[in-house]
Amino acid sequence: MSGQRGGTLRHLIRSPRGAFALAVLALLAITALVSLFWLPANPNQSNISEAWQSPSLTHWLGTDSSGRDIASRLMAGARVTVLVVLGAAIVSGLIGLGLAIISALGPRKLREPLIIFIDVLIAFPTLLLAIMLAAVFGSGIPVVIVSVGIGYGVQIARVVRAELRQINAEDFILAARASGLSRWAILRMHLLPNAAPVFVVQLSLAMGLAILAEAGLSYLGFGAPPSVPSWGLMLQESQSQIAIHPAVVMWPGLAITLTVLAFYLLGDALREAMDPRLRFGGRRADSVQSGDPA
Amino acid sequence: MIRFLAVRALTLLAGLFLASLIIFISLRLLPGDVAQVIGGTSASPAQVEAIRERLGLNVPLPLQYLDWLGGVFTGQLGSSVVSGTSIAAEIAEKAQVTVPLTFYSLTIALIVALPLGVFAAYRRQALPSRVLSVLGVVAAAVPAVWAGLLGIVLFSTWLGWLPSQGFPRDAWADPLTAIRSLTLPALTIGLIEGAVLFRFVKSATLSAIGAEHVRTAMSRGYTRLGALVRHGLPGVGLSVVSMLGLQVAGLLVGAVVIEQLFSLPGLGRMLVVDVGQRDLIKVQSTLFVLTAVILALGALVDVVHRMIDPRLRVEEQ
């Protein structure tokens, strides 16, 4: 199993999309880590006399309307992004996997109502869910994480459920059942490993969408509080000055787009790296079989 | 067909019921004391009691729920706690911005995605198709706020072609001015949703080109283009129709952020303002109306798809 996983990573790095995605995400992680210990300047320190400075050695990307260092705010904003991405991945992963398993393999009486429930939640837009939670609990990053986690969790559930149903109908599952494996063992040893590629790809997509949701919600004032530098908030702050200083809007927008793109491409590259049929182009059937957990 | 309609109507009703429950429980049960939330932390106990009395919050919750649900179906949504205006009237007024904006952006998304998606699939290896496909992925990664801000800089600040913000006070009295102020917002959402639709149209067209009935048409002497247009594209069109419900939902929700960005007096902006003012009763009704529209659109698209897709008709017989 470990050898197979190493193979996935190797394939990921070899594909241009995978390498690009991993590079951007590594940069994001390193920036967020470094920002915890060191920043070029205090990201919240305003200094009106230094407003709208051009990029220089002291202010790499210049300063904003209240003289705050843009590079430092951008670096500190990476923390919020990492937090939201990890939080949304954990919540949506747990919800998605849990609902998928119960609605695919659970008690028959539970399945149908659960599927309708999932469908309604999918139709319920994530942004509206976030606004609703913000109305009740007040704004903040936890509201963003929970609403994005639920919103994309149910979408993951629908896709993974379909995959689990399909695998469950395969002959090797029947064989496993006939050989006396318990339902739990079949789930752990056969169903989950085979559904893992679909799950991981969906999760990576959800992580990208979570960043977009954070940006929109922070822009609306439901996300990060004003004291916490976040990329969505930086977009909002830049709006009032956009006619005079259009350059300031570029940095947070570029940072968001690049990171979201990295997650999309990671999903694409993972799909190819984890699917043995795509990996070998269908030519090396022998190694496909030896690599298959079934 | 009648059986299908009945089943679809039932699932729609179940969906509406579930959505109303989720919204009601979230906004009435989770906050603890709704009257206290509406009044704010500075409200005196007497004021909170007055709010509770006025909004009927001291009757049992199931009764409150039935009362609200009855109001929703008769169009009696009550009045706003903050402004005192009728909620139903205000939703109808704000919809005059949001609904045209949604259809405007849908038109843009379709105009962009349909021809380009078919082209990118038909000439898959050509350079423009590859560029388009890269653009399609990148555009889906762009935050709507940023796209809107860049649009303002380009079309308003630099070129001066379109207004940067706002909507005429007399609304649609001068349709041309109204359309002009909706153009930049519609372009922003339309192009982003168009990127998603583009990728869908492209993959649908690709599978149509590879489909057996299209290849058969070619073997009968149709050109590749002729076979695709005559036998492939009808199927692509049907797949697009089945996607429209999701698309419109995406555009409607996208309007929330975009209305804020462009200061448009629509439903999304109203919702954001109401949340800020803790007008929970109004938020509850607005959320339900929006969700109901999205669920109903989904059902409508399913029914239309069923009616116009001959393959589904054959299966039934």
Image: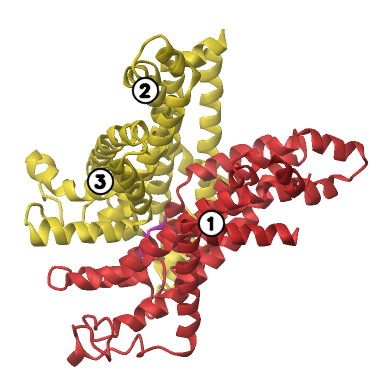
From the image, state the color of chain B. yellow
- Residue identifier under label 1: A204
Three-letter amino acid code at disc 1?
Ser
Cα–Cα gap, marks 3 and 1: 37 Å
- Judging depth in this view, the residue of B313 and B301 nearest the camera is B313
Cα–Cα gap, marks 2 and 1: 32 Å
Residue B277 is at least partly visible in this image: no
Crowding near the residue tagged with mark 2, few <14, some 14–19, many ≥20 C-alpha atoms within 10 Å = some
B276 falls in the magenta region: yes
Three-letter amino acid code at disc 3?
Lys
| Residue A222 place in picture, x, y as percent | 40, 65
- Residue identifier under label 2: B233
What residue is at 34 percent from the left and 63 percent from the top? A220
Residue A113 is at least partly visible in this image: yes
**Callouts 3 and 1 close, C-beta under 8 Å:** no
Please tell me whether mark 2 sits on a helix, a strand or a loop: helix
Can you say which quadrant of the picture contains the C terminus of chain A?
A: top right
Judge from the rendering whether residue A154 lies leftward or rightward of residue A106; answer left or right: left
- Residue identifier under label 3: B94
Please tell me whether mark 1 sits on a helix, a strand or a loop: helix
Please tell me whether mark 3 sits on a helix, a strand or a loop: helix
From the image, state the color of chain A. red
Judge whether A291 appears above or below A7 on screen. Answer: above
Three-letter amino acid code at disc 2?
Leu
- Which circle marks residue B122 in the picture? none
Tell me where the magenta segment starts and ends, as one range.
B275-280
